[in-house]
Amino acid sequence: MTGLTTYQIVPPPGAATLSFHFGRQGIGLEEAGETLPSDSLFAALVAQAAMLGTAAPGADGAPAFARPFVDGAPPFTLSSLFPRLGALPLLPRPLLKLEVAKALHDTIGKGFKKLRYLSPALFATVCTGQEISKPPIIMQAGKVWISQAELAELAALKSWARSARDETEQAWQQRLSATPLWSIESLPRVTVDRASSASAYYEVGRVTYAPEAGLALLVRFTDAASREGFERLLTLLAESGLGGRRSSGYGAFSWQRGPELALDLGAAGTRAVLLSRYLPAGDQELAALRSERSAYHLVRVGGWVYSLGRPSQRRQRVMMVAEGAVLDAGAAPAHGRVADVRPVYSPARPHPQLGSGPGTDHPVYRSGLALTVPIPDEEVR
């Protein structure tokens, strides 16, 4: 077992679907994604803890909840939020070669480039270097692959089950492939200037999940006693809303605890696959990224910070390793660190209102703590 507890993000009471605005870095609000990265989720939990007013002594205004994470002794580690279909979490495609039967390879063709998420069974198949021989159920325009062996889980879902009518197996699988798990659209909005009454048109991106689909969160608890506090913050976050545009009705959700994620990965080796964003801590972890056994993409993480009594400001940017990376854990285990990205201004480049110095009187955290699953070494396949 992987030691990962699954939390299913489900619609709030009275709602049939989930809707969020998970913004992407850019000029406007039009862009939205289907998932929320682990650093943003951690920041949202810290904000909920700060609202409770539990400051840690000598912690520069930070809530007590954040202190063990900053000190390098986290009681738990979070994944990013990934899509989910029923109880089936969809995991990021590992940066490994996909071993695929030739006939299947010829059928899929350039579709390999679109793949982003794998069902747990296919994730384990790729991580252990086995061949994908049976055609997967390809959904969401090629972004999602689900194995034939996991179709039984979909058959138990009311919205996705095989029709009681005379629907053949082939027709059912074709219907599954054609039905979107989520849809992203830009909704029109108008704002009116209070002084001139002039109107301005803009659009806001929204991701909506199909019935019985949603998001999944994976958590590894190193301190079992921390589970209660984490779930309390998750409940508060569900009531406050997740992502942007919450005043427009986006972001409300409920959650339920699922079973521990079961992955048949065989004997663990000295490599690991990343399920969160990762910010290396120290030279040794940076050196491990340069190993020829590591493969990763980098993502530049920026954005804004909103602090009570202060103007909106851009937080400092950091470069993080994206989900799905393969890390050489033999060279150095990936632990990661939490960075304080509050804006800091110099006398040479002061803020027009705040002058020089820190832009807030409290830290602004982005978590780069790594959540990984060990996988076999190449020669142990």
Image (cartoon, rainbow, N blue to C red):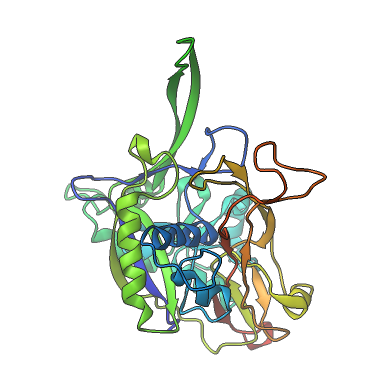
Q: On the picture, is 152 further left or further right than 271?
A: left
Q: Is residue 202 above or below residue 83?
A: above
- Residue 360 is at least partly visible in this image: yes
Considering depth in this image, is 145 or 190 the residue closer to the camera? 190
x, y percent for residue 309: 50, 44
Q: Is residue 371 visible?
A: no
Quadrant, the N terminus: bottom left
Residue nearest the viewer, comparing 379 with 334: 334
Based on the displayed image, in which of its 4 quarters is residue 342 positioned?
A: bottom right
For image coordinates 61% across by 43% down, the residue present is 313
Please determine whether, in this image, residue 351 is positioned above or below residue 377. above
**Residue 269 sits above or below residue 220 on the image:** below
Say which quarter of the image contains residue 280: bottom right
Which percent across, then down, holds residue 134?
A: 48, 65
Image coords of residue 284 (percent x, y): 76, 80
Image point (44%, 67%), residue name: 55
Name the residue: 40% across, 67% down. 54
Callout count: 0
Quarter of the image with the C terminus in it:
bottom right
* Looking at the image, residue 319 lies above or below residue 246: below
On the image, the x and y values in percent for residue 220 come to 44, 77
